[in-house]
Image (spheres, rainbow, N blue to C red):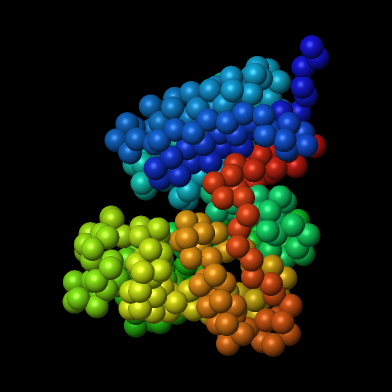
Amino acid sequence: MAKLKDIYIGFDLGGTKMMAVVYDQKFKLLGKKRKKTKGNEGAQAGVQRIISTLNEALADAKITPDQLKGIGCGIPGPLDLEKGIILEAPNLGWKNVRLKQMLSDEYHCPVTLLNDVDAGTFGEYRFGAGRGGRCVLGIFPGTGIGGGCVYHGQLIEGGNHSCMEIGHLNMDRNGRLCGCGKRGCLETSASRLAIAAEAAAAAYRGEAPILLELAGTDLAQIRSGVLAEAIARGDKVVEAIVRNAASRIGLAIGNVANLLAPDIAVLGGGMVEAMSSLFLEEVSKAIGQSAMKPFAKDLTVKVAELGDFAGAMGAAASIADLTQ
């Protein structure tokens, strides 16, 4: 049997999981492997875990490493994009990891690193909810709020780092302190962590009895699905908290729309998936309040379609474009 050619791997590294997906030149999924990350294992052991994950994905696809044309990696945290270095992966405790060189040495093929949210946005642009868009924003609320933008087919990036940090748009200069050191960033009032903190306080005050029953006041237990269930079962205060956060995200998107005039905004991540109708309603309404009328009129808000595969698909498409 003749060997398949132009095989790509898309790799997505998260704070709690990593996933490698093997694609052919038409981006048909051939094989995959998912593993948990270990925050205490160190960078060297972590890279070996990445290599093991890639090898197991190749084995699942019945592909040999010599058939690889490239590996694209979506990585969280600050990166040196030109040299392919993970400057810091805070959730994993890694610093200055030369991942591009290490994977190139292992597999003898081109490797590229890009921000994980950029990878997810590019995946949705190429294969998901952003298909056909001229300018596509990706907004992924989670522990923080990640953003990415594809403009005329190209990811918008800085000279040597990712950008589009929509979670750090200033919404209130006297607001809460953000992890970045500034006050009033969007993340401080609209991330899942911010929502969970406000909802936990409501539960403690007796204003959210369903949430108190489901998760108590433990922030680690107040996940997206729990918030969605509490709302579905009648916790009106929790619903108001989530709607207010979604509205703030919409205001931020409207401000970005005044600069870039995007035609599609893709909302992704577990919180949006769990409460998609609520987010679509509030975000769309708030965009109309902050974006100029022509920009708001031309902007369609959609829910991401690719789920967990967005980052891997976007990373694979990125390396495929570089190696054409």
Q: Is residue 231 above or below residue 146?
A: below
Residue found at the far front of this picture: 233
Residue found at the far left of this picture: 205
Q: Residue at x 51, y 59 (%)?
A: 273
Q: Is residue 119 above or below residue 280?
A: above
**Which is nearer the eye, 12 or 82?**
12
Q: Quadrant of residue 97?
A: top left
Q: Is residue 102 above or below residue 74?
A: above
Please identify the quadrant where the N terminus is shown. Answer: top right
**Which is nearer the eye, 93 or 194?**
194
Image coords of residue 308 (percent x, y): 54, 46
Image coords of residue 160 (percent x, y): 58, 51
Query: How many callouts does the rendering have?
Result: 0
Q: Residue at x 34, y 35 (%)?
A: 38
**Which is nearer the eye, 297 or 322?**
297
Q: Is residue 253 visible?
A: yes
Q: Residue at x 76, y 28 (%)?
A: 6
In the image, taking residue 157 as reference, residue 178 lies left or right, namely left
Image coords of residue 296 (percent x, y): 68, 81
In the image, taking residue 279 as reference, residue 296 lies left or right, namely right
Q: Is residue 98 visible?
A: no
Image coords of residue 61 (percent x, y): 64, 23
Q: Residue at x 39, y 75 (%)?
A: 239
In the image, taking residue 260 as reference, residue 158 lies left or right, namely left
Please identify the quadrant where the C terminus is shown. Answer: top right
